[in-house]
Amino acid sequence: MSNAAAPAPERPDRSDVPAHVAIIMDGNGRWAAARGLPRAEGHRRGVEALRRVVRASHELGIRYLTIFSFSSENWSRPASEIGDLFGLLRRFIRNDLASLHRDGVKVRIIGERDGLEGDICALLNEAEELTRDNTRLTLVVAFNYGSRQEIAKAAQKLAREVADGKRDPETIDADALGAHLDAPDIPDPDLIIRTSGEQRLSNFLMWQAAYSELVFVPLHWPDFDKAALESAIAEFARRERRFGGLVAKSAS
Ligand code: FPP
């Protein structure tokens, strides 16, 4: 069969590439179920998709890539699935950290580390430490992360500063709260992609998403690839961003 009639993948103009892309990697379970495979296989293939997308991100010139890899609400899943997801994170860091470092990727972790097993915390710290001076792409891994929890924690820190006499309550504004979130130095996402057709944020970066463009993709996460990322970026480039004003402008 000839490929002549296949539509060319949409290639974004480099100037349209968003600085920060965040992804809700949804649909691993449905991908596996559709093939009669265990959910764990869907997650394993999800890690392969993640490797592809990290590579594609630095090829395309994306500066920050945030991925939702384990949510605060994922604890309600069966213990065996939680074990699978933690096992994949361990393996991802052990197997991929050296090549991420070689490729100039800086790893940052957001989310709650209290209560995580010691070896997981050690791996997360090692990934951040080893890659701290890299500058090509920042990969932000949201692990044991929930946006409401992150905002509540920021409010707690501000309240403590007030209680300790270090802050006047009148100085608490959006900038002050934003500065107490998990990664205040990282710009807000320009584009948030969710795979598998669901159209919601599910407690992901709700503060930071105030002016993000949202793109929902029907593919399940294990099928997501560079062409799908390019299509999402092309859709982003067609949007008019006004940030509450009247004239379209860019975030920077
Ligand atoms: C959603 O699929 C995906 C997750 C809950 C976790 C995403 C995790 C990975 C891609 C692999 C682990 C990541 C790292 C960094 C090692 P789902 O299970 O909710 O799918 P479903 O909605 O079809 O059931």
Image (tube, rainbow, N blue to C red):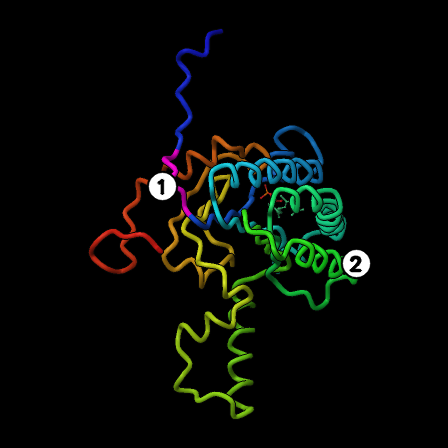
> Residue 62: horizontal and vertical position, in percent?
47, 44
Dot 1, crowdedness within 10 Å: few (<14), some or many (≥20)? few
Badge 2 element: helix
Q: Quadrant of residue 112?
A: bottom right
Instruction: Please check the rendered image and state whether residue 13 is part of the magenta-colored stretch, yes or no.
Output: yes
Q: Say which residue label 1 marks.
A: 16
Q: Which of the marked residues, 1 or 2, is nearer the chain's N terminus?
A: 1
Examine the rendered structure and indicate whether residue 80 appears above or below residue 170: above
- The quadrant where ligand 1 appears is top right
- Looking at the image, which residue sits at the far bottom? 165
Tell me which residue sits at (44%, 34%) in the image: 230
Tell me which residue sits at (79%, 58%) in the image: 119
Dot 2, crowdedness within 10 Å: few (<14), some or many (≥20)? few
Tell me which residue sits at (36%, 41%) in the image: 16
Dot label at residue 55: none
User: Which amino acid, mark 1?
Assistant: Asp
Instruction: Please check the rendered image and state whether residue 178 is part of the magenta-colored stretch, yes or no.
Output: no
Badge 1 element: helix
Which of 44/234 is in front?
234
> Residue 251: horizontal and vertical position, in percent?
35, 55
Query: How far apart are the two marked residues, 1 and 2, measured between alpha carbons?
Result: 40 Å
Which of 147/243 is in front?
243
- Residue 187, visible in the rendered structure: yes
Q: Which residues are magenta?
A: 12-18
- Residue 73, visible in the rendered structure: no
State which quarter of the image contains the C terminus: bottom left
Examine the rendered structure and indicate whether residue 17 appears above or below residue 75: above
Q: Say which residue label 2 marks.
A: 119
> Residue 46: horizontal and vertical position, in percent?
63, 39
Q: Quadrant of residue 37?
A: top right
* Beta carbon at label 2 within 8 Å of ligand 1: no
